[in-house]
Image (cartoon, rainbow, N blue to C red):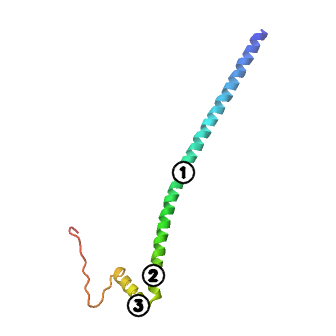
């Protein structure tokens, strides 16, 4: 009877340890999945931020070049007059009094 009691106790202990081992394994698997998901999403976020940074750096360089061009115009009054005329023509569609502006409209409009 004593050996039967011990074997029942041993079997019960094995079940408890088996459940504990299974729970530990599940916890490890869940942790690994969570860490993997976090790494992947952060890498995607970093890539997107890098792309955005590259676009902003490109825009900054373009603005610096434009500022340098404007600075060159402002240093000389003759260049300033040319710059003002260029802005009036390009941005405001102005023309001299002896000029005519023609607009070309594509076919089908």
Kindly identify which residue carries mark 1.
Answer: 43
How far is disc 3 from disc 2 in space, using C-alphas?
13 Å
Kindly identify which residue carries mark 3.
Answer: 78
> On the image, which quarter does residue 84 sit in?
bottom left
Closest to the observer, 57 or 38: 57
**Viewer-side label of 1, 2:** 2
Task: Please determine whether, in this image, residue 29 is positioned above or below residue 87.
Answer: above
The extreme right residue here reads 2
> On the image, which quarter does residue 87 sit in?
bottom left
Circle 3 — which element?
helix
Question: Mark 2, residues whose alpha carbon is within 10 Å: few (<14), some, or many (≥20)?
Answer: some
Task: Please determine whether, in this image, residue 85 is positioned above or below residue 38.
Answer: below
Closest to the observer, 6 or 73: 73
Kindly identify which residue carries mark 2.
Answer: 70
Circle 2 — which element?
helix
How far is disc 1 from disc 2 in space, using C-alphas?
40 Å
Circle 1 — which element?
helix
Task: Please determine whether, in this image, residue 74 is positioned above or below residue 34.
Answer: below
Q: Measuring 51% from the left and 62% from the top, which residue is drawn there?
A: 53
Q: Measuring 56% from the left and 51% from the top, which residue is drawn there?
A: 42
Could you say where residue 25 lies in the image, as x and y percent from the top left?
63, 32
Q: Measuring 47% from the left and 64% from the top, which residue is drawn there?
A: 55
Of the two numbered discs 1 and 3 on the same chain, state the one appearing first in sequence: 1
- Numbered mark located on residue 65 in the image: none
Could you say where residue 81 lies in the image, as x and y percent from the top left?
40, 89
**Viewer-side label of 1, 3:** 3
> On the image, which quarter does residue 1 sit in?
top right
């Amino acid at each position: 009877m004593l050996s039967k009691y011990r074997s029942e106790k041993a079997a019960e202990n094995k079940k408890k340890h088996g459940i504990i081992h299974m729970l530990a394994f599940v916890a490890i698997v869940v942790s690994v999945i969570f860490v993997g998901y976090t790494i992947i999403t952060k890498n995607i976020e970093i890539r997107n931020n890098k792309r955005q940074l590259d676009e902003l750096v490109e825009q900054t360089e373009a603005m610096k070049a434009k500022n340098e061009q404007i600075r060159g115009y402002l240093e000389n009054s003759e260049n300033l007059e040319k710059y003002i005329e260029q802005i009036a023509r390009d941005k405001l569609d102005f023309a001299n009094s002896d000029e005519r502006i023609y607009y070309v409209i594509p076919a089908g409009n």
